[in-house]
Image: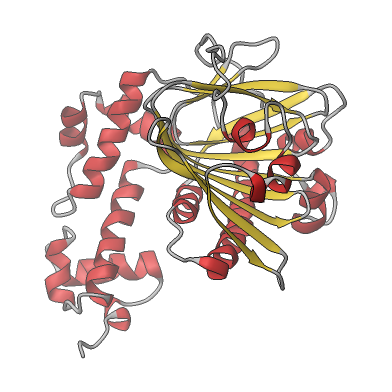
Amino acid sequence: MKSGSQKSTTAPQPNSANEGLWRTIMAGPGQSLGAVFANLEAAPQVERIVRHPTRGLLGARVTLTPEEGDGYWEFTRIRGDFYVVVWNFVYKNPRFELVPGDGLIQFNFKVTGDLTLGVSGAKPLRFNRPSLLVWAQSPGIDVPEWTAPSAHEKMVVISVRPSFLVEQFVTSISEMPSQLQACVSNPSGALNYCQLPLTAPMFDIATKLINNPYQGALALVYTEALTLELLCAAVSGFSSLPALPHEEYNERELKSLQNARALLMRELAPAPTLRKLARSVGMGETALTHGFKSVYGETISQFSVRCRMQHALALLRDQHWSVDKVSPAVGYSHSTSFATAFRRHFGVRPIDVRRVKP
């Protein structure tokens, strides 16, 4: 399912030698991922470089200067032609660069931000909501890419050889969903891309990668493990594509959906009703219900329960609260109802995860 019906946006033009995103800054305009990683040690703004020689891992963090904005990129090479780039930054001004075709398949797990890709023969593809964009470029095809000013870009980008997906995730290309096959067997001179909602598991794994809690070699191992898990979720997610309609949302609607999600994360006891939630964010109940599922990959009820159960787990395990005390704190009037919901969600009883306070 190709997606080329995003809102048209005019690409900004580079106006100085400092224009560009990480490819331009790290290795020069139009350079490949391989060139970027080969140039890590000599590149400007590199905060640190870490290696794990036994596992063949290489990692580096590059920070933005205060004049550019705030934030960083995190680069990891897991093995030959298997790269991970974590985006977590805000630029003061729009940035533009050309992404060269290098024969890799790129999985873009967008959490927040406002990125646009120029797609030949179609309107630009605006990438400004939680979603997964998968695209494959043939060598020789350059795709313009630009970010909006003051947009907080939080994204995990995984780039791999098509043969790696076939060898490591399935036994043959015929086992892959047809939409993913189109990227793996990308014909010469073509650009294939597909966009689908970011599922709850993808969202959680990508967020963990962005907020990697470890340092040094341990951070590299953690990144490798979560990257493989994230690719598994992505490959599995393609199976649901035929049933997914392509939806368009304007900036006001996206902001309302973001506010609804934030409200559900804050208000755990009691959880807001659909009517209250819709009124609070300025959307109709039907539009909110449909939009939330389309953008975030789970229903309002599923997300609300997940937030409350995660909070309950933290209270039981880390704060040593009793089951009777946790129940009302996550919106349950009776401890038996809470215990049933908790066991249904995690597969264990609340009392089984509660630690005895030392």
Residue for point 21% across, 66% down: 337
Q: Give the quarter of the image for residue 240.
A: top right
Q: Give the quarter of the image for residue 229.
A: bottom right
Closer to us: 262 or 219: 219
Q: Position of residue 169 (x, y in %)?
A: 74, 56
Q: Is residue 311 above or below residue 93?
A: below
Q: Position of residue 301 (x, y in %)?
A: 31, 46
Q: Is residue 340 left or right of residue 114?
A: left
Please identify the quadrant where the C terminus is shown: bottom left
The answer to whether residue 168 is seen in the rendering is yes
Residue for point 27% across, 81% down: 354
Residue for point 32% across, 42% down: 300
The answer to whether residue 235 is seen in the rendering is no
Q: Is residue 101 above or below residue 320?
A: above
User: Furthest residue to the bottom?
Assistant: 358
Residue for point 32% across, 25% down: 287
Please identify the quadrant where the N terminus is shown: top right
Q: Position of residue 147 (x, y in %)?
A: 49, 24
